[in-house]
């Protein structure tokens, strides 16, 4: 059985990947500082509390568990915060990530799966975006993901390890079995915020209604978190092949506007949502839609929950059962 170190495994995407790893008979070991993650989300796997900056603790973890591969989720990931406090992002996402690679080199780990982001592209020149699209991030968060990918590429070219970087578009939804869900504090993502507004009868701001899109609001490509998790397992399998590294977009190729998301939440929940037209949020591109043909072709990824309604239904199920998140 392969043992996989999952940094940030208690977080939203990480915990869904951990569940999938267990289901497919891998042994995940979670390393997380629980700053944004939840201990309740990872009840069935070994857990080490620790910060990425703590190399001693990390090394001990590599020693205690004989690690075969690393999946690296631990990162700061709020675009707005990265604009206000860029050093936090360069320190955690780049500097601490490099410390992790140093340990990986020391322990001669050859397989690395990285959580990257559509934010590496910046304002797209054309949609759907393919992986060869130019990378020109418009905020420090995207910059850190782009820098780290280039570090990985250089390491790979030096023959030190193989990596797969998955560029997530908008991860959404919840574990269809209802065990896991999205619980950020504070929440900043559209779908959980609209569901919360439906549940509590509060309002939700629509950031920008004057974009050059059919209804004036931003368009995003929402991908179910369990489909995303499955892609990580395929990546791990692919890394078993000699000298292979790759970068893949993770989306469904369908764009939905903010208004369409709100309408779909209303349909799924049967409740009205009060939407308040608000100014644009800085750094938001008008339209981000992925081409994920490359991962379908090369890794055989097939999404099971590609449509927005299903994605929102799974999220609704979790939020309805956990109105206060994992504390319920
Ligand atoms: N958005 C919005 N109101 C909110 C939160 C988000 O209108 O309260 C918009 C946001 O401007 C973007 C889309 O919803 O166009 C998705 O935002 P989210 O933060 O979920 O993901 P991002 O695309 O930033 O990764």
Image (spheres, grey):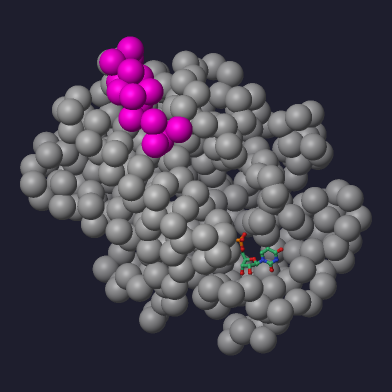
Region in magenta: 51-65
Q: Is residue 254 visible?
A: no
* Camera-nearest residue between 266 and 162: 162
Q: Which residue is pictured at 38% across the width and 63% down the height?
A: 143
The quarter holding residue 201 reads bottom right
Could you tell me which quadrant the N terminus lies in?
A: top left
x then y, percent, for residue 48: 46, 21
x then y, percent, for residue 276: 82, 72
Q: Give the left or right position of residue 296, taking residue 18 as reference.
A: left
Q: Which residue is pictured at 53% across the width and 73% down the height?
A: 283
Secondary structure mostly seen in the magenta stretch: helix
* Camera-nearest residue between 144 and 261: 144
Q: Give the left or right position of residue 127, taking residue 283 as reference.
A: left
The quarter holding residue 145 reads bottom left
Q: Please say whether residue 134 is one of the residues in the magenta stretch.
A: no
Q: Which residue is pictured at 16% across the width and 39% down the height?
A: 161
Q: Please say whether residue 62 is one of the residues in the magenta stretch.
A: yes
x then y, percent, for residue 208: 68, 79
Figure check: 159 above or below 59: below
Q: Give the left or right position of residue 214, taking residue 159 as reference.
A: right
Figure check: 41 above or below 223: above
Q: Give the left or right position of residue 309, taking residue 96 as reference.
A: right
Q: Which residue is pictured at 83% across the width and 55% down the height?
A: 197
């Amino acid at each position: 059985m392969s043992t996989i170190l999952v940094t940030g495994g208690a977080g939203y995407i990480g915990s869904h990947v951990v569940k999938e790893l267990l289901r497919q008979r891998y042994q995940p070991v979670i390393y997380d500082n629980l700053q944004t993650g939840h201990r309740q989300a990872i009840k069935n796997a070994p857990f080490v509390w620790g910060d990425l900056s703590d190399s001693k603790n990390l090394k001990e973890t590599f020693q205690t568990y004989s690690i075969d591969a690393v999946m690296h989720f631990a990162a700061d990931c709020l675009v707005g915060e990265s604009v206000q406090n860029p050093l936090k992002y360069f320190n955690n996402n780049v500097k601490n990530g490099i410390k992790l690679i140093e340990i990986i080199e020391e322990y001669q780990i050859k397989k690395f799966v990285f959580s990257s982001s559509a934010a590496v592209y910046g304002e797209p020149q054309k949609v759907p975006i393919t992986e060869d699209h130019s990378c020109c991030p418009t905020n420090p968060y995207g910059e850190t993901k782009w820098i780290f990918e280039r570090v990985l590429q250089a390491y790979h070219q030096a023959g030190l390890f193989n990596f797969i970087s998955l560029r997530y578009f908008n991860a959404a939804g919840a574990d269809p079995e209802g065990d896991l869900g999205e619980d950020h504090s504070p929440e900043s993502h559209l779908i959980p915020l609209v569901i919360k507004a439906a549940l509590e009868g509060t309002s939700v701001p629509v950031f920008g209604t004057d974009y050059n899109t059919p209804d004036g609001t931003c368009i995003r490509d929402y991908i179910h978190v369990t489909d995303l998790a499955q892609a990580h397992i395929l990546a791990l399998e692919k890394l078993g092949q000699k000298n292979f590294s790759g970068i893949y977009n993770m989306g469904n190729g369908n764009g939905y506007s903010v208004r369409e998301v709100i309408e779909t939440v209303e349909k799924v929940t049967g409740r009205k949502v009060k939407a308040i037209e608000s100014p644009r949020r800085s750094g938001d591109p008008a339209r981000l839609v992925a081409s994920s043909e490359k991962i379908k072709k090369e890794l055989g990824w097939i999404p099971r929950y590609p449509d927005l309604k299903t994605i929102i239904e799974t999220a609704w199920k979790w939020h309805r059962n956990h109105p206060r998140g994992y504390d319920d």
